[in-house]
Amino acid sequence: MRSRTILKDRLEKDAVICAEGYLFELERRGYLQAGAFVPEVVLEHPEAVIQLHREFLRAGSDVMVAFTYYAHREKMRLIGKEDLIEDLQKSALRMARQVAGEGKDNAILIAGNICNTNIYDQNDAATHLEVRKMFDEQVVWAAEENVDFIIAETIAHHGEAKLALQAILDVGLEAVVSLVGHGEGRLRDGYSLVDSCLELEQMGATVVGMNCNRGPATMMPLVEEIRRAVDCHVAAIPVPYRTTRAYPTFQSLEDPGCNCIPDNRPFPVALDPFTCNRYEMALFARKAYQAGIRFIGVCCGAGPHHIRSIAEAMGRTPEASKYSPDMTKHYALGNDPKLKKVNQVFAEQRKL
């Protein structure tokens, strides 16, 4: 059995890159339905999940995250498939392990995953008990599959984050707890992100921080503030979208130039015009690293090219770097001496 401080040990040595873009990417590929966003693909098309794991592995992710986001009891009940929850969870965990084993030198970490339940109500103690039961069964399944650590992500209530963390600690595993800051940059039960992270650190989280809903521009100031406040390691896992001060989350983005979007809301399936390019994500990764943040990745909307750009920004050459761009060989924009000069002249004159 691996050391139960394997994640902390790795973070003490270098950054850990974590790809978390499974939900949106599999929706784009036609294997998952937007709306409920339940990962039925794990059971219906396991080959698609395994392929995406492999693509993130080749791109440089240090972590294979079991695709169990939104595979909890409440979501499975919503689509009438609660009886399949254990099969889905265990299948996803085994897929992550299978692909992690394809990495070199046994260096790829395996993470279980729990997330926001959408039933937590700070004023209803009964929901607290129900949430804890949901977390408990998931972390037990993850522990039985011998994951290295568990990510509790996209959590918008401090109280729910504490329930998630305690469930993970109770099975003896390290925890990454990632919060979401909605428009006002606070948690829904009134806690500031910093105050919540400080308490989660005191409880025993290995990593605290943020994931999802905010792009690089609007997440960076908040994770820098968290980094200054806590002593433990910090997570920064933004969505790859150009959020702004006026539109700080990808749910809030508007596209006035398009009159064909249902309800005039680009989120979640018409965000294409706002997508960050690979160079923007590389810049974010470098800034995060310079700020002392070591658990770095990309959330909903990530493609393997984003992960590769982050790995290369960290000075790494993952397998997929074999195919990183080399524009010197482009027929008109390149400068390789074997190219036809006439095409380069044409490009210069016409400004292709």
Image (cartoon, rainbow, N blue to C red):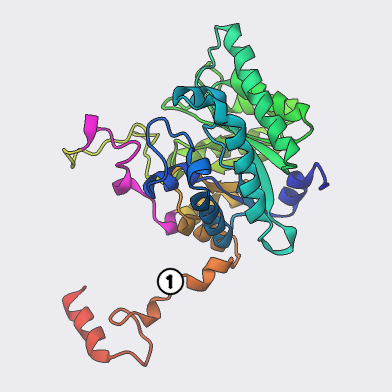
At x 40%, y 34%, the residue is 249
At x 37%, y 45%, the residue is 242
Looking at the picture, tell me which residue is in the foreground, 103 or 284: 103
- Tag 1's secondary structure? loop
Q: Quadrant of the C terminus?
A: bottom left
Q: Is residue 347 visible?
A: yes
Residue 226 relative to residue 186: left or right: right
Residue 228 relative to residue 215: left or right: right
**What is the x, y in percent for residue 208?**
64, 35
Residue range highlighted in magenta: 261-280
* Residue 325 against residue 114 in the figure, above or below: below
At x 20%, y 74%, the residue is 351
Q: Which residue has dot 1 on it? A: 325
Q: Quadrant of residue 124?
A: top right
Q: Is residue 294 visible?
A: no
Looking at the picture, tell me which residue is in the foreground, 143 or 260: 143
> Was residue 346 drawn as part of the magenta stretch in this picture?
no
Looking at the picture, tell me which residue is in the foreground, 252 or 139: 139
**What is the x, y in percent for residue 12?**
75, 49
Residue 320 relative to residue 266: left or right: right
**What is the x, y in percent for residue 328?**
39, 80
At x 66%, y 43%, the residue is 111
> Was residue 274 drawn as part of the magenta stretch in this picture?
yes
* Residue 342 against residue 225 in the figure, above or below: below
> Callout 1: few (<14), some (14-19), or many (20+) C-alpha neighbours within 10 Å?
few
Q: Quadrant of residue 347?
A: bottom left
As shown in the figure, which amino acid type bears the numbered disc 1? Answer: Pro
